[in-house]
Image (cartoon, rainbow, N blue to C red):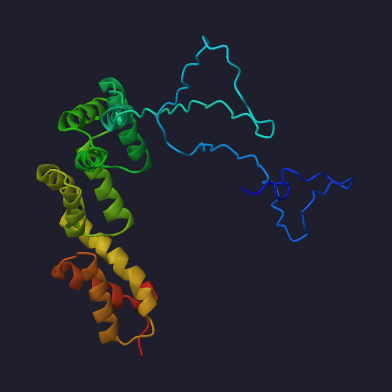
Amino acid sequence: MTSLFGRRPAPDAAAEPDGWFVGQTDDAPVVAAPVVRPVAPLRRTPTERTETETTPPRDVSSDAPTATSPTTPPEPAPRTLAWTAAVEAPEDDADDRAEADEVEAPVDPEVRLAELDLLAVRRLARRGCSEWEIAELLRGHDAAPDEVEHVLAELRRRGYLDDAELARQLVESLHTRKGQSRAVIGRELSSRRIDASIVSEALEAIDDDDELRRALVVAEKRAGQLRSLDQATAERRLSAYLARRGYGSVIIREACSRALSGSKRSGVSFR
């Protein structure tokens, strides 16, 4: 076996003063001493999912000292990794809470009726309306049938709704101011769903003589714009104009004849 410091000297060899043994040569291989390097201990990364680690109990009964290498750092004590899971609320409970938040508080019936009444009064303040028109307005705001009847009755009681008075006002406005015939006025009242008996009573205020007078006023006013036309063209256009206002054929012929014949009175001249 070769020594770390060269060959083993012979038993009888004496060491020379320079430290070489007798019989030792320079060709003898020299084996270097191994270098002891500290070995780092294996460590577990925090991202590793492990079970709870425990340190084995130390035997305190033994008085023997623990041999440690001076070049080896002490191994750190193992640490315990505790894993906690976030507890989430069940989806069913979350849905129940969301639905509970969306549930609206019940509306007081009296407050609801007051809101519908105010809505109808504001509409009536802008223009006259029939009972059917107000009922359609309330139904458009999701009013129940009993709520509609209650609001209509309250408006009648206060005098805000009166189909008969509305029909009378429409007859006066459409016939006197706009010169419309009884037929046109009757269709207008019917479109507002006013009762037929109320419409007939309102139209009785217009008799045949009054119808002719209104047609003649309209024809004379229109004839002033047909001054440059010949007789036939002026009569044809004037007749069509009166027909669009709902006048009957008898009244149209009479009104055209009077309006076009009185050229001096009406200011109409023909070529």
Residue 185, horizontal then vertical, whole percent: 21, 55
Placement of 37 over or under 86, stated as above or below: below
Q: In the image, what residue occupies the spot 80% across and 48% down?
A: 21
Residue closer to the observer: 189 or 81: 81
Whether residue 94 sits left or right of residue 25 in the image: it is left
Can you name the residue that lies furthest to the bottom here? 271
Residue 91 image offset from top left, x and y in percent: 29, 32
Q: In the picture provided, is 43 more to the left or to the right than 97?
A: right
- The extreme left residue here reads 197
Quarter where residue 257 is shown: bottom left
The quadrant of the image that shows the C terminus is bottom left
Left or right side of 269 for 146: left
- Residue 51's quadrant in the figure? top left
Q: Residue at x 14, y 44 (%)?
A: 201
In-front residue for pair 130/23: 23
Q: Position of residue 9 (x, y in %)?
A: 73, 46
Please give left or right for residue 152 compared with residue 68 in the image: left
Taking the spot 20% from the left edge, 59% from the top edge, the residue there is 184
